[in-house]
Image: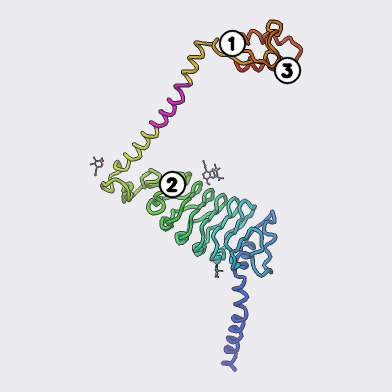
Amino acid sequence: MEKRVPVLFLCLAWMMLVVASPMVSANAEGEALNNFKLKLQDPKNTLESWDPALDSPCTWFHVTCNKENSVTRVDLGNAGLAGELVPELGQLKNLTYLELYGNKLSGKIPSALGNLMNLQSLDLYMNNINGLIPDTLGELKQLQFLRLNNNSLSGLIPTSLTGISGLKVLDLSNNFLSGRVPYDGSFSQFTPISFNNNSNLCGPIIGKPCPGSPPFSPPPPFGPTSSPDNESSIRPGRNSNAVIAIGVAVGAALLFAVPVFGFAYWRRRKPHEFFFDVPVYISSAEDDSELKLGQLKRFSLRELQVATDGLATRTSWEEVDLARCIRDAC
Ligand SMILES: *[C@@H]1O[C@H](CO)[C@@H](O)[C@H](O)[C@H]1NC(C)=O
Ligand SMILES: *[C@@H]1O[C@H](CO)[C@@H](O)[C@H](O)[C@H]1NC(C)=O
Ligand SMILES: *[C@@H]1O[C@H](CO)[C@@H](O)[C@H](O)[C@H]1NC(C)=O
Ligand SMILES: *[C@@H]1O[C@H](CO)[C@@H](O)[C@H](O)[C@H]1NC(C)=O
């Protein structure tokens, strides 16, 4: 008796696994997404169509699948969602776009998101996500867009991210990140804008030496050949850039200013040489009766000012408006 019970139990468990597993795998992606839905508050009913009873999530709104009914996109930007990300999202192996920006998501970024080997875009910006950026995100070798800005992320920026060779856009601004900003690999193309307004970042990209370590050590791969400890050897590049920038700005300003001042000066000196082509009927028509209506006559600015001053007493509103218009242009 004592021996048969566990055997029977094991047989039953095995049978249940065999029967159940094809069902689970058939809609594993739907279940993963439904697990996410269960963790969310959805005041706008954005996820109303997410019915776990359906065969696949491919008919759900905001979900896109490939021809093999595997999820490739989840588009839930600005959807009013609150709640947390779940590790199950890491099961969507064919996911290319995960767009969850502009919600009220909180909690941490699950390290399981590093399993999304096809992910090209991870947009979690403008949420309340906190905690660390997981090291595992460095495994997202297809990633091109990583925007985690405007959250409450803290800690270090993982060096693993520099190994994502195709990374085109990185935005980690407006968080509470601190420590050394990696500057090699794909990070060599990024500027301080990507890291703006964090707690306490340092390193060559930021232009601020990290405390407790030799400034800017080791040297950037493309930097001038110099000792790693020589801070001033990194500065000339920045300084000459600044000089060029100032030079260009001053040049542009001069380019603009010279014609403007020149024109103003010329205008002051020769006020009477402005002429307007004016339809005849707004001049004092009696004097120029030989001109037909619709013909143009050339008047100097001064003549027009004198002529239109008298027009205010006329009854025709069109004439008065025209007169005003001409005066304003002067
Ligand atoms: C990803 O898609 C391929 C076909 O495009 C499919 O064979 C594979 O099962 C999918 N992966 C998952 C986890 O669904
Ligand atoms: C992020 O936050 C900053 C500062 O609060 C704000 O100026 C900026 O507009 C925000 N960015 C986005 C994309 O909302
Ligand atoms: C800096 O980022 C924090 C966190 O997102 C934000 O609350 C704050 O408004 C930002 N400050 C400025 C000046 O942009
Ligand atoms: C640092 O760089 C400056 C200017 O490039 C040079 O004169 C100086 O000898 C360097 N110092 C060291 C320790 O390499």
Cβ atoms under marks 3 and 1 closer than 8 Å: no
Any part of residue 111 in sight: no
- Residue with the mark numbered 2: 200
Between 157 and 144, the residue placed more toward the observer is 144
- Residue 89 location, quadrant: bottom right
Classify mark 1: residues with Cα within 10 Å, few (<14), some (14-19) or many (20+): some
Residue at the farthest top position: 287
Between 85 and 176, the residue placed more toward the observer is 85
Label 2 and label 3: CA atoms lie apart by 66 Å
Query: Is residue 68 left or right of 197 when viewed as pictured?
Result: right
Between 7 and 217, the residue placed more toward the observer is 217
Q: Secondary structure at mark 2?
A: strand
Classify mark 3: residues with Cα within 10 Å, few (<14), some (14-19) or many (20+): few
Q: Position of residue 197 (x, y in %)?
A: 48, 44
Q: Of callouts 3 and 1, which one flags the residue occurring earlier in the amino acid sequence?
A: 1
Query: Residue placed at 38% from the left, 31% from the top?
Result: 247
- Residue with the mark numbered 3: 318
Residue type, label 1: Ser
Residue type, label 3: Glu
Residue type, label 2: Asn
Cβ atoms under marks 2 and 3 closer than 8 Å: no
* Quarter of the figure that contains the C terminus: top right
Any part of residue 147 in sight: yes
Q: Secondary structure at mark 3?
A: helix
* Quarter of the figure that contains the N terminus: bottom right
Q: Of callouts 1 and 2, which one flags the residue occurring earlier in the amino acid sequence?
A: 2
The range drawn in magenta is 246-259
- Residue 256 within the segment the image draws in magenta: yes
Q: Position of residue 305 (x, y in %)?
A: 63, 10
In front of the other: label 2 or label 3? 3
Q: Position of residue 82 (x, y in %)?
A: 63, 55
- Residue with the mark numbered 1: 300
